[in-house]
Structures are given as structure tokens and as C-alpha cells.
Amino acid sequence: MTSPGHGTVRPPLWLLAELTYRCPLHCAFCSNPVDYARHDEELDTASWRRVLAEARALGAVQLGFSGGEPLLRDDLEELVAHARGLGFYTNLITSGVGLTSARARALKAAGLDHIQLSFQDSTRELNDFLSSTRTFELKSKVAGIIKAEGYPMVLNCVMHRFNLQHVGRIIEMAERMGADFLELANTQYYGWAWLNRAALMPTAEELRDAEAIVQTHRARLASRMKVIWVSPDYADAKPKPCMAGWGTVFMVVAPDGVAMPCHSARMLPGPALPNLQAMSVREAWHDSEAFNRYRGQAWMDPTCSGCDERDHDFGGCRCQAFLVTGDAAATDPVCPKSAHRGRIDDMLDAAAAARADGASTHTLRFVPGARRGAGLVF
Ligand code: FES
């Protein structure tokens, strides 16, 4: 299948269905749009069933049910059963709030393959502070439910200045809980995390120390639990192959039906994003201006189009380029060849200065309505 002027386009193998932006948690690094309250519309069950069927017919094989908190949707079991019937491999990405034994069994019966459970830290104090909820005990219980129901379990923890020092304890917690995989995902600075970057960003030294601890545990754990360390591109000074290339394998469908090449594309300037209430998944993927905008290499500036890495990093991240430089088509600013690399170095210098001054959570900004306690000082 070809798209206008862009050669062969493969199907979207990975579909992420963001069923709702509603969430009981209010994390300081939430990936919801910062103005998510403006997008409160949600596709109904029939629309989601159609979207899933169209995506599967186009060639999608992996399906993530995400949010917000997808368990807030009463039709989750129906959508899982529908997806399973279509032949998807299904994954639930959850905070754990709402996952009772009964619901875990019902989802299993519907055909759910896999659950990814988020933690914010290995301590109740920090987990509950960063999520603005008292959920640490509940999440621990939910991990037990997931294992008892026989699911493969991924624990996910977003890493940043406040919990990197606990990385060894986070690994030991995941081991105790019987996780099959632990994803230690260093914060990506979009959405709420971008707003809070000055408070969240660790120093290069803190990252190095944490990674060394991860390596020690990896050697000890061997094949018992796979530990995935998602290294931050800004510290590595190496653009990440974001989404494996724009419009290449990944489609996100937002709660209101907006189809996007990545989670953050809603904030980019340029052509309107396609809405699946008004068009098919096939049209959105192949024909929409938004999906074709940064597909392939024709959009690249000379720094990227003349670089030997272009077939490996696909030009890096368009959202990061926009947030840091104001131009979504610019060379990813984490790249040493970018004229704007100095802005990333300034952010790292600011992180080091903040650490020297004694980092605290007092400056964190949370989504409206979050219940706040006293700040924490580290
Ligand atoms: Fe949007 Fe990287 S997050 S392109």
C-alpha cells in the first residue's frame, strides 16, 4: 500500500486505545495533555468496536488499552473480548485502581493477555505523594491479584530525580511481587512532565549511579525477571527512534477518537489530526496530512537528511523538537549536531544546580483537583 508521495507504508502494527483521560491518580508526570479537561468526549462502545475491527483489518496485531485509567470504562471487558475475537494480542496498562479479583477474572475470561501495572516508587510516602492518592497498598494488593490470576505482569515505574536513589529497592520490590518484567522508564518530558521538568530532571551523575545499580541487579536476576532500563535520550545525547518513526508502526487513538502518530502529537502545530468519528482507520493512517507529515525522510532538514543515523533514529522526536526549539521539523535538540543542543545542556545544568540547592517537591505542579499534602524534601 502506498501513500501520496511517501512510498510504501506498512500497517500500524501497534494500536494504543486511550479509552479515557479520566484517572483517579494525578501524577506529576502524567502523559495526558495538560489541557485534557477540554477533551472530555469519549467514543462509545460501538465506535471503539469499529475502530478495533478496522485497525485489525489493516494489519494491527498488538493492542494496548490505556488511559487515563481504562478500568473506569464499564465496557472494558466487552472491548477486550471483541479484540480477542479479532485476533489481537491485548495488554491492559493500568494504575491498578479498580482491578479487583472479580474484574481480573472477568478480563481473563474475555481473553486479556497481559497486564502492565504502574508504581510511582518503592515507598508508600513517595508513591502516594507523586500520584496525589493513597494507592501504594492497593497497588501492592493488585500485583498479587494479577499473579494469582496467572497473567504475565509488567511493573512500570517512571524514574526521575525523586526516585532514582531508590532504584535498587524498586527492583527488589518487583522481584518480591513476582513481576516478569520491570520497566524503569526515565521520564520523557512532554505534557505534565514538561511543565515539571525543572523539578523532575536528574543530574547526569544520578543517572549514571542508578544505571550501575540496575546492571548489578540484572546480573543477579539473570532470566528470573527482565529489567528494562529506558535510558533518557537527553543525557545520552542520542536522539531516540521515537515511535520507531512517525507513522511507521504506531497509532494512538485518544478518547475522543483523534488518531495520532504519538501520545503528544495533539499539541503540535500544523494540520488537524484525523478523527475516527469522521473517517476510517485506513484513511487516517494512509491519507491524512498529519500521519504523512513526518513520514519517511522528505521532511528532514539537511542536518538529518545528510546524517548516517537517519535510518536508525528516523530523525528523533518531533514533539521534543517542537517543545525545545518551537519548530517540529527541526533536528531533535538532544542531538549534538543540533544548533539547539545548548538548550538541553542548560536544562541539565539547571538540574545540577537545583540538586546542589537541595531538591524538593514543593515546585511540582499537579493536575487541577489533585489533593495535596505537604511537600517532600530530598
Ligand atoms: Fe511525539 Fe516523539 S513523542 S514524536
Image (cartoon, rainbow, N blue to C red):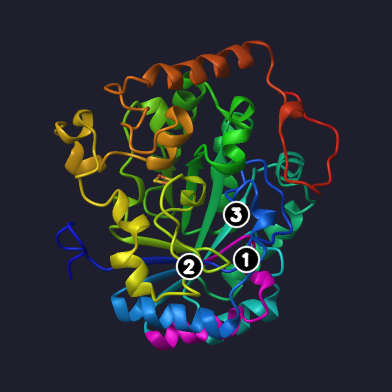
Distance from disc 2 to disc 1, alpha carbons, whole Å, reads 15 Å
Residue 90 horizontal side relative to residue 138, left or right? left
How many numbered discs sit on the rendered protein? 3
Which residue is located at x 50 percent, y 78 percent?
Answer: 112
Helix, strand or loop at mark 2:
loop
- Of label 1 and label 3, which has the lower sequence position? 1
Q: Amino acid at mark 1?
A: Thr
Q: Is residue 318 left or right of residue 188?
A: left
Q: Which residue is mark 2?
A: 275
Residue 213 among those drawn in magenta: no
Residue at which label 3 appears: 118
Mark 2 or mark 1, earlier in chain? 1
Residue drawn at the location 35% of the way across and 79% of the way down: 56
How far is the residue under mark 1 from the one under mark 3?
17 Å
Quick check: can you spot residue 12?
no
Of residues 145 and 117, the one drawn nearer to the viewer in this rendering: 117
Q: Nearer the viewer, residue 229 or 325?
A: 325
**Residue 196, position in %: x, y?**
63, 32
- Does dot 3 land on a helix, a strand or a loop? strand
Query: Image check: 205 left or right of 289?
Result: right
Image: magenta residue range: 64-86
Question: Residue 64, relative to residue 341: is it above or below?
Answer: below
Ligand 1 is within 8 Å of the C-beta of the residue at disc 2: no
Cα–Cα gap, marks 3 and 2 = 29 Å
Mark nearest the camera among 2 and 1 is: 2
Q: Amino acid at mark 3?
A: Ser
Query: Which residue type carries mark 2?
Result: Asn
Q: Quadrant of the N terminus?
A: bottom left
